[in-house]
Amino acid sequence: MTIVYACIAPHGGEIISELAKNREISDLFSKTRAGMMNLAAQMKTAKPDTIVIASPHNLRLWKKIGIVFAENSTGYLVSDSKSKVRISISVKCDTKFARELYARALNKRLPVVGVNYGTFEGPASDLPMDWGTFIPLWFFMEGKKHRGKQIIEPKVVIVSPSREIPLNQNVAFGREIARLAKAQKNRRVVFVASADQAHTHKKEGPYGFHPAAEKFDDLAVDRIRRGDIRSLLELDPRFIENAKPDSIWQLAMLQGVLSEVPMEPMLFSYQVPTYFGMLSAGFSPLA
């Protein structure tokens, strides 16, 4: 089999209506929420057996790409509203795919490390889920309740890019994801780049204002719509630092995937509801 679908998914908490403080805040994110629902519909059509998701908010390993070896990952988010709504999900991880990916990447001399949490195996081998993983999965995967947890049906592989290594190594890692997917017999694999765009759109935001934010996001919208992610990876690092996106490293992995499996892009949404840009886009394999 091969990569049957890929996407760029934002991960601002208020996309999930239950987490919005009030109706007014929820409405600010309506355009992005609609984009995520479009991605979710395409994900359902793709019928993945394994979802590989790259998050910038998982373990931050210095000069290392992380691959989660834990058997499970569980997380929860709580709203800022007075009602303190709490939502949670739990996934089974595709440990076989994760370990084979590690072996392939290591063979290519890529700086990878396998990570676990709790115990080596069994129910207590359960890595706490970050919001960059949680929020896309909340939309994308149908599940069922089991002992009070939302158990997601497809298995998941969680990876974390490194910001301290050359971008081309993150690209090479993405290429190995696609090559391993091609080697899988009768398993449908999806790749998700969990990513928000520039974080310096507003003076009131935690990173302040910089004019590079709007320029970066304009470029991201244009290049992603045209399927030209590679050119984003060639931007001046100082420009990227001023715009402060958390997307470049996951996009590098996505570029690696696309170099092995040509796909057609479709931009579903872009907006700046608060201080950071949010973009959702899907990629379907060419017929």
Image (spheres, grey):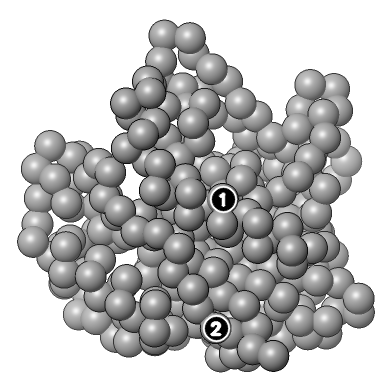
Q: Secondary structure at mark 2?
A: strand
Quadrant position of the C terminus in the picture: bottom right
Q: Can residue 236 be spotted in the picture?
A: yes
Does residue 222 appear to the left or right of 153 in the view shown?
A: left
- Quarter residue 241 falls in: bottom left
Q: Secondary structure at mark 1?
A: helix
In the image, what residue occupies the spot 36% across and 54% down?
278
**Image height check: is 200 above or below 233?**
above
- Quarter residue 178 falls in: bottom right
**Image height check: is 87 above or below 116?**
above
As measured in the structure, the alpha-carbon distance from the residue carrying label 2 to the one carrying label 1 is 19 Å
Q: Nearer the viewer, residue 99 or 130?
A: 130
**Image height check: is 6 above or below 36?**
below
Q: Amino acid at mark 1?
A: Met
Q: Earlier in the sequence, mark 2 or mark 1?
A: 1
Q: Nearer the viewer, residue 203 or 40?
A: 40
Q: Within 10 Å of the Cα at label 1, are there few (<14), some (14-19), or many (20+) other Cα atoms?
A: some
In this view, the residue farthest toward the right is 185
Q: Which residue is mark 1?
A: 37
Does residue 214 appear to the left or right of 167 in the view shown?
A: left
Does residue 253 appear to the left or right of 21 in the view shown?
A: right
Point out which mark residue 264 bears.
Answer: 2
In the image, what residue occupies the spot 18% across and 40% down?
205
- Quarter residue 234 falls in: bottom left
Q: Amino acid at mark 2?
A: Glu
